[in-house]
Image (cartoon, rainbow, N blue to C red):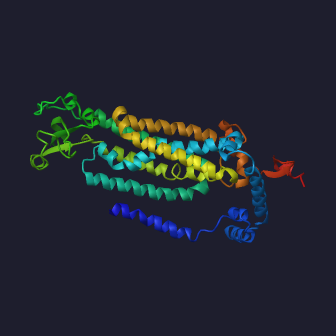
Amino acid sequence: RYMLGLSAVPAVIQFLGFLFLPESPRWLIQKGQTQRARRILSQMRGNQAIDEEYDSIKNNIEEEEKEVGAAGPVICRMLTYPPTRRALIVGCGLQMFQQLSGINTVMYYSATILQMSGVEDDRLAIWLAALTAFINFIFTLVGVWLVERMGRRKLTLGSLTGTAVALIILASGFLLSAQVSPRITLNPPDPSHQNSTCTKYSYCNGCMLDPDCGLCYKLNKSSVVESSCIPVDKDSTMKAAWGRCSNETVFKKEDLFWAYNFCPTPYSWTALLGLILYLVFFAPGMGPMPWTVNSEIYPLWARSTGNACSSGVNWVFNVLVSLTFLHTAEYLTYYGAFFLYAGFAALGLVFIYGCLPETKGKKLEEIESLFENRLCTCGMSDSDEGRYIEYIRVKGSNYHLSDNDASDVE
């Protein structure tokens, strides 16, 4: 109850912050509140002159209103107009790879992942999971500081590279644990005379991948001895269905240990290191950047539809990855699941490198031109840094002029 109640605290803080948030000058101009728009724009820009920016926004809104009045649904016009189609692919791709790199698996299952890696104490696993969530919070703030210094493209590329490396470390920790998995030395007869699958396993790793089984064992210093794979109790995963570990009070007195969903291993620290590094790299870039970029790359007439589509893609892949994680770990092994996420992160790196242009410092009115090239070359659009593009209206079309060309236009 306390955990659920605490989630209301940031919601209240955010609500209070919204009370002091100024309206968007673009929205005010759309609603005809031009004086208020000028005042807010002046407050946002400080002592800078706003006339040129105000006129640019107003002219752009007039053009977009004409386009919105065209026939057909907005999504159809987005898909048939190459720049917005490419922007939509980039926006949805960012949201897809954010989820396919496993972020919500890590956040939802962090305590379970730590237990899988060999952390035996439930309370310790929960506190370590809280530590990873705190790291996610701190490094998200780091992303706020870095975004205007590094730019969206560089920050996202660096973040996803580090995320892929962290996933490989996490997977390697599970792989090392599997390679030194304790051998099962005892095979007691099943008193219920049922053909349990637990008796067929020779090593702890196989026993742990079976959701119906657990490991009953003793420790000789740090070595696992007298181990057996036993069916788990149907009412509680904290004890075995029968045998030495079926009575929790008794087996603790006899120095017996019961492990469900994890194998005793000296490599638990590797998984914790992988989780921490994952969030250190993910939180500043791949966490906020898909949302930041999607808020910038669509023209005003397509923005709500573009953001709705990309958000839908995010939630579809969120549900897909979250629902399949435990099954993926069962069929591909724990390390196989995280190697799979690392592979998706590597694919995302290729996609972002080729398709995501730098939008840092670009006016919303200029960003559309970044997607005029073919999709696979959009990511190179930021190579012309410092190139300023002016827009003129000639016979109902937008023409993009370089500095030299624009100087000849009255």
In depth, the one of 179 and 12 nearer the eye is 12
> Residue 50: horizontal and vertical position, in percent?
76, 66
> Residue 127: horizontal and vertical position, in percent?
32, 56
Residue at point 58%, 71% (across, down): 20
Residue at point 84%, 51% (across, down): 393
Is 356 positioned to the left or the right of 249 in the image?
right
In depth, the one of 322 and 259 nearer the eye is 322
* Image quarter of the N terminus: bottom left
Q: Is residue 162 above or below residue 331?
A: below
> Residue 137: horizontal and vertical position, in percent?
45, 58
Residue at point 74%, 53% (across, down): 64
Q: Is residue 144 above or below residue 22?
A: above
Is 84 positioned to the left or the right of 115 in the image?
right
Answer whether residue 151 is visible to the viewer in this image: no
* Image quarter of the C terminus: bottom right
Residue at point 38%, 64% (across, down): 6
Residue 232, picture quadrant = top left
Answer whether residue 40 is visible to the viewer in this image: yes
